[in-house]
Image (cartoon, rainbow, N blue to C red):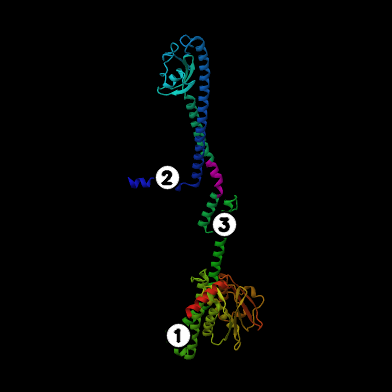
Amino acid sequence: MSRRAGREPGRPARWWRRQSLRTRLTVIAAMAIAVSVFAAFQVASELLDRELRDTAEEQLRADSRVLATNAERAGLAKVELPPYPGSGRLVRVVLPDGSTRTPPGQPSLPPVSENAERVARGASADLMESDGSDEEGYAVYTLRAGDGAVQVARPVDDSPINRFGFGMLLIGLLCMVGGALVGRTVARTGLAPIDRLTAAAVRVAHTRELDAAIPDEGGGEIRRLIRSINDMLAALRNSRQAQRLLAEDAAHELKTPLTSLRLNVELLIRLDRRGTLDSALPAQSRTRLLNDLGAQVDELSTRVAELTDLARGDVSDESTEVLDLADVVVAAATRARSRMPDIEVALDVTSVWVSGRPAALERAVLNLIDNAGKWSPVGRPVEVRLRAEGASAVLEVDDAGPGIDAADVPRVFDRFYRADSARALPGSGLGLSIVQRVVDAHGGRATVARSARGGALLRVGLPAAAPALVARLTTGEDTAAS
C-alpha cells in the first residue's frame, strides 16, 4: 500500500508531461474558464440568496406590523386572522397564557420557541428566526402585540437558488466546451510557426541540406528561436564547408609526397625482385634514395601531425596557466636550432607574463622560427625579439630573406597557402595557419610586415597577465626558492 500510495501522485505529472503543448493549452484554457465560472456561480449564488432572504424578511416584517396593529385594536383573542391562501404566508397569534391561534385549514407551524415566548412576555420587541427541523423549513418573524405576540412565517424556498445553480452549471459546461475549442484554436494558431519550424528542422535532419534557411516569421520569442536556429544552421554550413575544404586541401597536399614515396618504394621492390638492386643502384645512389625516402616520410609525418592539430578544432586539451612567455620563446628557439643546425637564431627577450597554454604557444613560436629559417640566407641570423608594450606582450620574428610580396600578404595565414616563390621549399603551408589559430585562441593578433633587413617581419601581440597576479606568482616563486 505504501509503494502504491507513493506512486499515485506521480501519475498526473507523468500524464501531463506526455501531452503535447497544444493539448496542454487546451486543458489550461478549459480549466481556467471552469474555475472562473465556478467562482462567479459561488458569488452570484451568495448574492442572490442574500437578496431573496432580505426581501422575504422585509415582507414578513410588513405583514407582522399589519397583524399586530389589528390585534391591538381587537384584542389577541378576538382579532380576525386572514384565511390561509393555500400557500405562502402563515400567521399565528401567541396569547398571554402561551396558547396560540391559527386560521382554520392552515398547516401547523413549528412549536413556539423559547425566544418567541420571551417576546410574548415583553422581554424583546421582535425576533427573526429560521426553523429547519422539518422537511420544509420556515422563516418566522415574531412581533410584540398587546399582552402577547403575533407571528408571520414563510416557507424557506431554495428552488430559485437551485434553478439558478442548474442554469449556471449548464452555462459552465458550455463555457468549458467553448473554452476548450477556443484554446484549441488559439493553440493551433499560436503554435503554427512552431509546427513549421519543427517540419523544417525534420526536413533538414532527413535531407542533410543545411542551405535552406527557415523563413523568419512570427514575433517575439518565435522570431528569436527561428533566428537562433538559422544561425546554428549557418554555423553548421560553415563547419561543413571548412571540413570539406580541409579534406580537399589535405588530399591535395598529401598526394605529392605519397606519390613520390610510393614510386621510390616500388622502384626498390622491383629491383630487389629482379636481383639487380646492387648493380642497378650503386651504394651512393642507394644511400641518396634511402635518404630521400626518410625525408619524404618525415615530411609526410609532419603534414599529418599538422593536419591532425588543425582539424581538432581546439588548440589543445591542456589547461591555461600564467607563464613567462620568455621561457616559451627560449624553449622554441632551442628546438629550432636542433632542427635547423645551419640557421642561427638570435634572441632578444625580456620577461613578459601571459595567460595561455604552454605547448600551444611553443608550437606557434616554433612555426614562426621555422618559417623564417626557410628564407634566411646562410650567415644571416633569424632575430627573435620579445618585449612588453603597454598591456600586451609583443613577439617579433625577423628574417633577412626576400620578404613577402604585397599580393601574398593577405593570405599568409591561410591554410595550405604557399607563395609561388615558396613552392620549391619544404613545407605544407599549415605552419602559419596554426600560428594564427593559436594566437586567436589566446585573444591576440598576428600581423606581417616588411623587415628593416629586407625580409619578412612576423609580429604577434598577446594580452599580458594582470600585474597583481604576476606579483603574487613571482613572490611565491621567490619564497619557495629561498
Mark 1 vs mark 3, foreground winner is 3
Q: Would you name the residue on which mark 3 appears?
A: 228
Q: Main secondary structure of the magenta part?
A: helix
Q: Earlier in the sequence, mark 1 or mark 2?
A: 2
Give the Cα distance between marks 1 and 2.
Answer: 82 Å
- Marks 1 and 3: CB-CB under 8 Å? no
Q: Residue 343 location in percent, x, y?
A: 57, 86
Q: Could you tell me which secondary element the residue under label 2 belongs to?
A: helix
**Is 306 inside the magenta-drawn segment?**
no
- Marks 3 and 2: CB-CB under 8 Å? no
Give the Cα distance between marks 1 and 3.
Answer: 63 Å
Quadrant of the frame with the N terminus: top left
Which stretch did the figure color magenta? 183-193
Query: What's the residue type where badge 2 is placed?
Result: Pro
Give the Cα distance between marks 3 and 2.
Answer: 34 Å
Q: Earlier in the sequence, mark 3 or mark 2?
A: 2
Query: What's the residue type where badge 3 is placed?
Result: Ser
Res. 95 image quadrant: top left
Crowd tier of the residue under label 1, counting other residues whose Cα lies within 10 Å: few below 14, some 14–19, many 20 or above: some
Of 32 and 222, the residue lying toward us? 32
32, above or below 115, in the image: below
- Marks 1 and 2: CB-CB under 8 Å? no
Q: Would you name the residue on which mark 2 appears?
A: 12
Mark 1 vs mark 2, foreground winner is 2
Query: What's the residue type where badge 1 is placed?
Result: Leu
Instruction: Classify residue 321 as left or right of residue 136.
Output: right
Q: Earlier in the sequence, mark 1 or mark 3?
A: 3
Q: Could you tell me which secondary element the residue under label 1 belongs to?
A: helix
Q: Would you name the residue on which mark 1 appears?
A: 271
